[in-house]
Amino acid sequence: MTPTLDTATSAPAPLRGLPGDRVTLDDGLVVEVFARAKLPTEFGDFEMVAFLNNLDGKEHVAVVKGDLVGAGAVQTRVHSECLTGDVFASRKCDCGPQLDAALMAIADLPAGLILYMRQEGRGIGLANKIKAYSLQDQGFDTVEANLHLGFDDDLRDYRVAAGMIHLLGVDSIRLFTNNPRKIQGLRDGGVVVEQRMPLLIEPNPHNQAYLLTKMRKSGHMLRPGDIASPMTGHGGRRPL
C-alpha cells in the first residue's frame, strides 16, 4: 500500500525524528516521519528514516549516524538522487563519488546526516535527464540541455529537506556542498548552516566539461585547479 500523508493538524510535540513526528512550515508545507530502521552498509552502520510530505509527494530519506536530537554542527550532505551516478557509477557526473565520500565522512563520527532527495536530474526527472544526456552527446552543456528542453537549469527545492532536518531535531549543520543555492535554500527553510565544507571529487575525462559548466554557469564554488587535470584511467569512485 502506498504511504499517504494525513495533513490534519495536531498539537506540537518535541521533535525526535520518530515515526509520526510532523512539522508544518510557514508556507503550509507538512513533512512527517513515516518509518525508521537500522541500515548496515559497507561504509558503516546507520539508520534510515523515511519521510512523507505534501509538496511533491515523493518519499525522501535520511541516512542518520548517532543521536541528532539537539546536536549542533552536524556534518550533513543533502544529496539529490542520481540513478546513473549513484547506482550505475556513471562517469558523466560526480554524484556517485560525492555520495560515497559523504558516507565515509560521517561513518566514524558520533553524529552525521545524509539527506537523499528524490530530485533526479536537478528536478526534471529521470526520463528528461536521459533526454538531456542525448543533447549533451550532440554538444550541449548540462545547462543548455535543460534550457533547450524548456526547464530552468536547476528546479530543485530545499524546503522539504529543511523540514526533514527540523524533524530530526538537529540544531545546526556543517554542510558538504559546492552549491551556494543549496546553502541559501536550507537557510530560507530555517536551517542554521554554520559552515560550508567543500566536497571535491577527482575529475575524469567524461565529467570535466560538466564540472566546468557547474563552476562557470551554475555558480558552484569550484576553482579551475579543482577540475583542470582529469584522470586518464578508470578512476573509480574515489574522493580526493
Image (cartoon, rainbow, N blue to C red):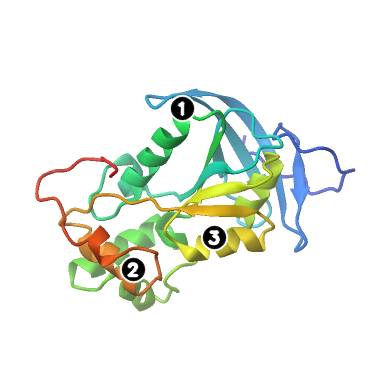
**Amino acid identity at mark 3:** Ile
**Amino acid identity at mark 2:** Met
Residue 68 picture quarter: top right
Task: From the image, state whether disc 1 or disc 2 is nearer to you.
Answer: 1
For the residues labelled 1 and 2, the Cα–Cα distance comes to 31 Å
Please name the residue shown 48% across and 65% down the image: 180
153 w.r.t. 54: above or below: below
Where does the image place residue 23, in percent across and percent down from the top left?
76, 47
Q: Is 34 situated left or right of 158 in this image?
A: right
- Quarter occupied by the C terminus: top left
Residue 35 picture quarter: top right
Label 3, secondary structure: give it: helix
N-term-proximal mark, 3 vs 2: 3
Which residue in the protein does label 1 denote?
Answer: 108
Q: Residue furthest right?
A: 11
Which residue in the protein does label 3 denote?
Answer: 183
Determine crowd level at label 2: few under 14, some 14-19, many 20+ residues with C-alpha closer than 10 A: some
For the residues labelled 1 and 3, the Cα–Cα distance comes to 24 Å
User: Residues at badges 1 and 3 in contact (C-beta under 8 Å)?
Assistant: no
Where does the image place residue 143, in percent across and percent down from the top left?
34, 72
